Amino acid sequence: MSTLILDKVKTIKTLNSIAESGLNVFNNDNFTIDNDSENPDAIVVRSFNMHTMEFGNHLKAIARAGAGVNNIPVDKCTEQGIVVFNTPGANANAVKEMVLTSLMASSRNLFAGLTWTKTLEGEGEQIPKLVEAGKKQFVGKEIKGKTLGVIGLGAIGALVANDALDLDMDVIGFDPFISVDTAWNLSRNVQRAMTIEQLFANSDYITVHVPLTDDTRAMFNQATFSIMKPGVHILNFSRGELVNETDMEAALESGKVGRYITDFPNEKVLKMKNTVPIPHLGASTQESEVNCAIMAARQVKEFLETGNIKNSVNFPNTSLPYTGKQRVVAFHRNVPNMVGQFTQALSSYNLNIADMVNRSRGDYAYTMIDIENKVNGDIIPDLKEKIKQIEGIVTARII
């Protein structure tokens, strides 16, 4: 059922602890933060599982203060006309630092060495001699001159690739969907792999930075391991499900994979040999949480106040300069003659269009129309009803 709402004060609800700097974005008379609200205008969330939640008819936006949106029922939101935002790049530096730290530490057997050293507690004056005698079991490799394969050259992957070059590594990158913005930020010294198989075959270390989709699920498996160099190190700071863990366990046992560094431990992973299980610390820095919170809040604020959309995972990114004119925004089925019906509805009240934009994404589209003349308050209910009756409308607002 379609809805149309004339905006007033907007209610924001948070489902996790959100950095105060982010909440301060809503610090004006147009917003109120109410975490007890049953029907907010927007929700800001981090990792809270929303899949069993029912959404009120006022909910217009959900912003994930982070990159992944697996905890949000995106398809359900799309059907109900709720825009879902994420914050790509806000935690990129934090993840990059963790990738490079893990790359070097695992290559030098630092994690295993530290664990072994702790077992010497209580040996007193014998500890220095025991250290000298035992350190040979932890002899590692330098990363200088080795080849790092980076799968996914978005905000995180590009930073990892560039910094690995500064560490005197050779870097191969693979991303068939690389954006223009990312390409500008990527060093020209990053070698381009034409196929992912080429990257697998030539890398000493492989780090993956892609979302979990039907195409990427279990992309690390027996078949892909067979292409790789013996003893390759694999770093996974994206999603645990990118790896077939049964195949990974076998590859680690055989030595085909020398080390598996993952930010997503579970019972099976903890039992695997030569695995470095990190407790999901990739983006866990004070700076990252602040950056994500501010970015998420700004995107929600912009959308609620102007209708503009940036960094949505289910709506088309759409922007129209906001000049203060009354604006109709509508999310609707991507079918012919929708824009024509909008203009007919407005012209029936002698309302002229000052500016407009229409963007589509799959089966849906998003339209913003600025009205040249002030809409008489007396006709707003009729205009609302006329827009609601257009077949294919999911949600609409007058700002």
Image: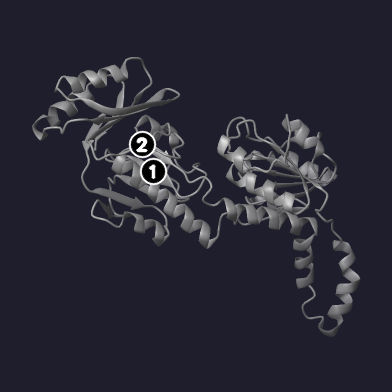
Instruction: Name which residue lies at 75% across and 62% down.
Output: 111
Confirm or deny contact between disc 2 and disc 1 (CB under 8 A): yes
Which of the 4 image quadrants contains residue 152?
A: top right
The quadrant of the rendering that contains the N terminus is top left
33 versus 320 height, above or below: below
* SS under mark 2: loop
Lateral position of residue 7 relative to residue 93, left or right: left
| Amino acid type at mark 1 | Ile
In the image, taking residue 80 as reference, residue 150 lies left or right, namely right
Q: In 3D space, how far apart are the residues under numbered discs 2 and 1 (Cα atoms)?
A: 7 Å
Question: Disc 2 marks which residue?
Answer: 82
Q: Which residue is mark 1?
A: 62
- Answer yes or no: is residue 298 visible: yes
Taking 142 as reference, is 240 above or below it?
above
Q: Amino acid at mark 2?
A: Ile
Residue 134, image x, y percentages: 88, 69
- Direction top: furthest residue: 336
Mark 2 or mark 1: whose residue is earlier in sequence: 1
Q: Residues within 10 Å of mark 2 (few under 14, many from 20)?
A: many
**Image spot of residue 90 (x, y percent):** 51, 50
